[in-house]
């Protein structure tokens, strides 16, 4: 194992795990891990904690990142550098602790798409490329000096989940290249100062996921659905009668560009198709979930809907 640098890894998700594993495989000296407290539900596991236990790596699970006992325990590890992948905003007392600094891996090409949900927002906004950025953490969120970037293309049909999987696969090598660049002095950190208009990636709430069927552009609706799939997922209200409705999550669709005279939001069901009328044509459902039921493909969805006429969404 490499004695230098002494690394503290900070992460909480499956995205984080890819980088943690890469560091461990390359025999970097991971002196400790910071992750979230265990989930309330016993069905869910903290996969970062599980990995730490499997490999005998010390770990801390602070609720409060300014707790004095947590900060004292963190100092004991004497980290040279901290690596953050998918975690909460760190207070200055934490990110300034290592002598080299704290680096973060962000799932966009900074300075574009700073914020909590970059993978979702690049697809919602119809971008055709994105990537990963490593940077030094400072006192402004996602604004530190850039170390290394990697671009990838976004396919027209790609969902947020599919894009996340692509980014996961290259995230570990990004961390390794960044570390090597820092220690071999091959990377010159560059400022994020820019004069171009910036797009942001704020946290997405449930209300933000509701589909606006009156949207003039069919592609805007399509991009929103795939940009929220599979999580947090786009949704609408499916009405069987004026006062009877259920929440309907939509995960996968295709577009049908076609002139028509149907009212917007009408649901048209045949033996093989369920489509919703919009201004430039139809949104054809491929995969969805009606409230109280499992996620289903279109064939099973249609089979489960007993009322076939006078259905609409809004």
Image (cartoon, helix red, strand yellow):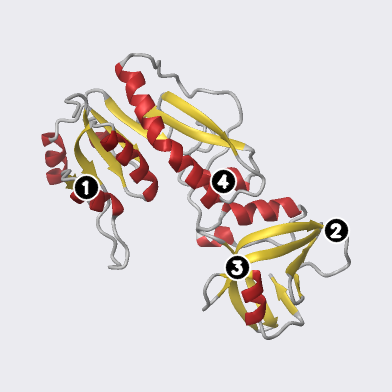
Dot placed on the residue nearer the N-terminal end, 4 or 2: 4
Q: Is residue 143 visible?
A: no
User: Where is residue 210, by image quadrant?
Assistant: bottom right
SS for callout 2: loop
Q: Residue 121 shows which numbered tag?
A: 4
Looking at the picture, how far across and down is residue 65, in whole percent? 24, 45
SS for callout 3: strand
Residue position marked by numbered label 1 in the rendering: 52
Q: CA distance from mark 3 to mark 4?
A: 21 Å
How many residues crowd mark 3 within 10 Å: few (<14), some (14–19), many (20+)? many
Q: CA distance from mark 4 to mark 1?
A: 32 Å
Question: Disc 3 vs disc 4: which is toward the camera?
Answer: 3
Looking at the picture, how far across and down is residue 218, in whole percent? 75, 54
Residue 134 falls left or right of residue 256: left
Question: Disc 1 vs disc 2: which is toward the camera?
Answer: 1
Q: Is residue 108 visible?
A: yes
Looking at the picture, how far across and down is residue 157, in whole percent? 65, 49
Question: Disc 4 vs disc 2: which is toward the camera?
Answer: 2
């Amino acid at each position: 194992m490499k004695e230098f640098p002494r690394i503290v890894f900070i992460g909480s998700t499956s995205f984080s795990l890819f980088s943690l594993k890469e560091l461990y495989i390359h025999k970097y000296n991971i002196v400790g891990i910071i992750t979230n407290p265990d989930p309330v539900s016993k069905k869910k596991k903290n996969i970062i904690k599980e990995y730490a236990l499997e490999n005998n790596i010390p770990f801390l699970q602070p609720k409060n990142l300014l707790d004095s006992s947590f900060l004292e325990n963190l100092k004991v590890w004497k980290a040279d550098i901290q690596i953050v992948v998918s975690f909460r905003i760190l207070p200055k007392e934490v990110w300034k602790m290592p002598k080299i600094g704290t680096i973060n891996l962000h799932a966009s090409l900074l300075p574009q798409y700073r914020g909590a949900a970059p993978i979702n927002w690049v697809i919602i906004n119809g971008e055709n490329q994105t990537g990963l950025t490593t940077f030094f953490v400072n006192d402004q969120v996602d604004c530190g000096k850039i170390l290394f970037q990697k671009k990838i293309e976004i396919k027209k049909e790609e969902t947020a989940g599919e894009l996340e999987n692509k980014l996961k696969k290259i995230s570990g090598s990004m961390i390794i290249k960044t570390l090597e660049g820092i220690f071999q002095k091959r990377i010159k950190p560059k400022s994020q100062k820019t004069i171009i208009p910036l797009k942001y990636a704020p946290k997405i709430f449930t209300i933000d996921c509701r589909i606006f069927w009156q949207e003039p552009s069919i592609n805007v609706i399509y991009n929103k659905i795939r940009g929220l799939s599979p999580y947090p997922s786009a949704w609408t209200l499916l009405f069987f009668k004026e006062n009877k409705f259920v929440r309907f999550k939509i995960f996968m669709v295709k577009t049908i560009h076609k002139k028509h005279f149907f009212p917007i939001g009408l649901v048209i069901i045949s033996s093989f198709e369920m489509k919703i009328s919009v201004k430039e044509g139809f949104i054809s459902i491929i995969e969805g979930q009606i409230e109280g039921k499992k996620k289903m493909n279109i064939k099973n969805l249609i089979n489960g809907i007993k009322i076939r006429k006078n259905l609409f969404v809004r």
